[in-house]
Image (cartoon, rainbow, N blue to C red):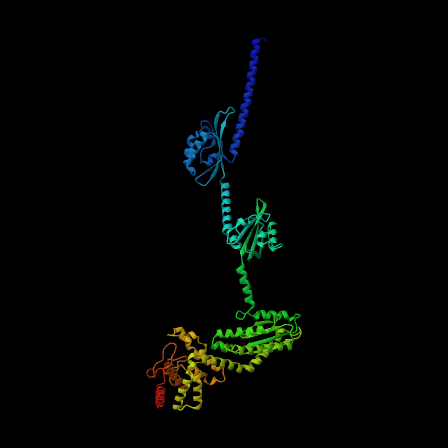
Amino acid sequence: MSVGKQRRHNSYHNSSQELSRLEKVNREIEENLVRFRAMVNNTHAGIVAEDQNRNIIIINQMFCDIFNIQARPEELVGFDCSGATEAVKHLLAEPDLFPRRISEIISKQETVIAEEIKFADGRVYERDYIPVFTEDKTFIGHMWQYRDVSSRKRSEESIIYQNKLLKALFKNSTDAIVYFDQYHHIIDINDNFYKLFGYRLAEIKGFNVDDVLDKGKKDSADRDFTSQVLSGRKIVAEDTRYTKCGRPVEALIKGIPVHINNQFAGGFGIYTDITDKKRYETQLKFLSLHDQLTGLYNRTYFEDELDRLDNSREYPVTIISVDLDGLKLVNDTVGHEQGDRLLINCAAILKQTLRISDILARVGGDEFVAILPRTGYPSGAEIAGRIQSAVEIFNREKQEHLPLSISLGHATSEEPGKPLQKVFKEADDLMYRAKLHKGVDARAQIIQSLLATLGERDYITEGHARRLERLCVMIGEQIRLSNKQLSDLRLLAQVHDLGKVGTPDNILFKEGSLTDQEWQTMKQHSEKGYRIALSSADLTGIANLILKHHEHWDGSGYPLCLKGDDIPIECRILAIVDAYDAMTSDRPYRKTMTKEKAIKELKKNAGSQFDPNLVQTFLSILEMDDHRENK
C-alpha cells in the first residue's frame, strides 16, 4: 500500500475511534442526566438548576408545588427565572425581601446552606444555593434547593415553648423544688426553695442535697428517698426537713427521676410545706379524742379504752362515775359561762386527785368517769374519798366561786371475766343513788351561793331589800293580808330580784338607757328567778310571785302580760314599793328623785302600771310615816 493510502486509512480509523469515544461519552452523559433527573424528581426537596443566564435546565415537581407553579416541570425547561421571583414573592412572609435576597446571593456566587425562608401561610423552608463552576473555574450556572422544615420548626418551637413553660413552672411553683444530678449534687433551686429553707443557690450549688436538708444526719429517710429517685423510682412521702437555721419543716416530698435522651440525668425534689396541715391534723386528732372545754378525754376515747382493757392484764380495774350536781340550775340562772367554769374546776380537781396511769374522761354534759387500771376495790374507795375531800377543800378556799357539789359511785372488776361495761353501769347506778340522796341539799347550797352573790350587788348593800320589806309589810297589814301572805311578801321583798344574778354587770349597772337587746336581757330575770325558786324547797312557795312581780295593772308588764286582779296582790304591792324605792335612791342610770316627785309619778301611773287602790293605801302610809318622823 502506498504511503498516501496508508495515511488515509489511518486517518479514517482514528476518526472512527473518536466517534466511538464521543458516542460513548454522550451516552454516559445522557445516562447521568437521566439518573440525575430521576434523583431530582424523587427527592423530597424542591430543586431547580439554571444556566449562567438563569434559564432553567432541570426543575422538579416539588419545586413547582412549593411555589404554586401550575406548569409541568418539562414545560419550564429553558424558561428564564429572572422574572419568576417577582411572580411568586407574594407567597412569602416578607415579599419584598425575597427577590432582593436572590439577587444578592447570585451576585456573590457563594454557597449558601440552610437559609430559612418563611411563607405567608406558615410554611418554613431551608434554602441551599450552590454556584456551579467547571474544572477551570468557569461559572456555568446555579443550583437551588428548598427543603420543607415546617414540621421540624414546629417541633423545635414546641420544645422551646415547653422548656420555657417548664422553667416558668420550676421558678414560679408554690412548692420548693431542687434539681440535683446523678451524684446527689444540687444544680438548681427555685424561689420557693429559698423562701421555705432559707438557702440561695450560690450557697448550696454543687452540695449534696441530703447534707443540706438533713443537716448531715446519717442514715436519714431523705437519703433513702434520694437513692430511690436516683435508681429511677418516683416517690411520694411525708417527712421532716430542716431550714438553714435548723427549724424543722414538715414536708410532703415528691421525688421525680429525670431522663434525657434515654439516659439518667438526675432528679427533682419537690417539697410542699405541710407544717400547718400536720398541726391541724394533730389538733383534729386531739379534738376527736378529747373534750374541748376541759381537755379531758371524751366518751369515744373512754369507750375505746374500756374495750382495750376488757381482756388486758391490767386487772383489777376500778371505775369511778362522777356527776356535777346542779349544773342545769347554774346554766339556767347565771348562764353557761358560769356552768362551764364549774365544769373546768371539777375536771381540774379530778385530774389532780387521780394518778398519771388513770384514765379520766368527760362522757356527758355533767358526767365524768375515771378508769383506774390495776386498782382493787379498797384502793378505789380510798381514791373516791380523796376526790370528795378535794371538793370540800376547794369550796373552803375558793369562796369567790360557785360551790362545787358532786355525786359519785365506784365499782370494781377483779378479773377479766366481768365485762367493764357492766362495771361502769354499776358505778353509774351507785352515783345516781348518791345524787338522789343529796339532790335537795346540793341545790340549796347553790341557791344560797346565788343569794349571797345577789347580796353583793351595790343597791342591795345600800338596804334596798330591808326598805322594801318594811314598806311592803306595812301595806299588807293595812289591807289585812293573812299571816302566810305577809310571810310570802317579806320573802318576796328579799329575793324578787334573784334572777338578776345571771344579768351581766354591764347591763345591770349601765349608765344611761338600755338598748332594745339589753332590755330584753334584763326582762329575763323574773323567769330566771322563777326557775331558781322552783329548785329550792325554801323558795318554791313564792316562785309564782317572783315570776309575776313585773306585771302591770293594765296588762303592759312582763312576762305574762297579766292585768288587774289576775296579778297576785303581793306582786301588786311590791311593784309600787319597788318603784318608789328606785325613784328615791341613786341608780346608775339616774340620780335620786325628791319624795314629792316620786309620789307624783306614782299618782301619774296609778291605773296603768299600778293598782290605783293600793297606790292610795301606800300614799296614806307614807303620810303617816312622815307624821311619825316629824313627831
Q: Residue 156 placed where, x, y %?
A: 50, 42
For the N terminus, give its image quadrant: top right
Can residue 501 be seen in this snapshot?
yes
Report which quarter residue 349 is drawn in: bottom right
For the C terminus, give its image quadrant: bottom left
Left or right of residue 428: residue 591 = left
Q: Is 23 placed above or below 366 here?
A: above
Which is nearer the eye, 538 or 590?
590
Q: Residue 159 placed where, x, y %?
A: 51, 44
Q: Residue 31 placed where, x, y %?
A: 54, 27
Residue located farthest toward the top when viewing the structure as drawn: 2
Can residue 566 be seen in this snapshot?
no
Left or right of residue 594: residue 414 = right
Q: Residue 272 placed where, x, y %?
A: 53, 55
Residue drawn at x 53%, y 26% is 30
Q: Is 13 placed above or below 252 here?
A: above
Q: Is 77 placed above or below 338 here?
A: above
Which is nearer the eye, 551 or 20?
551
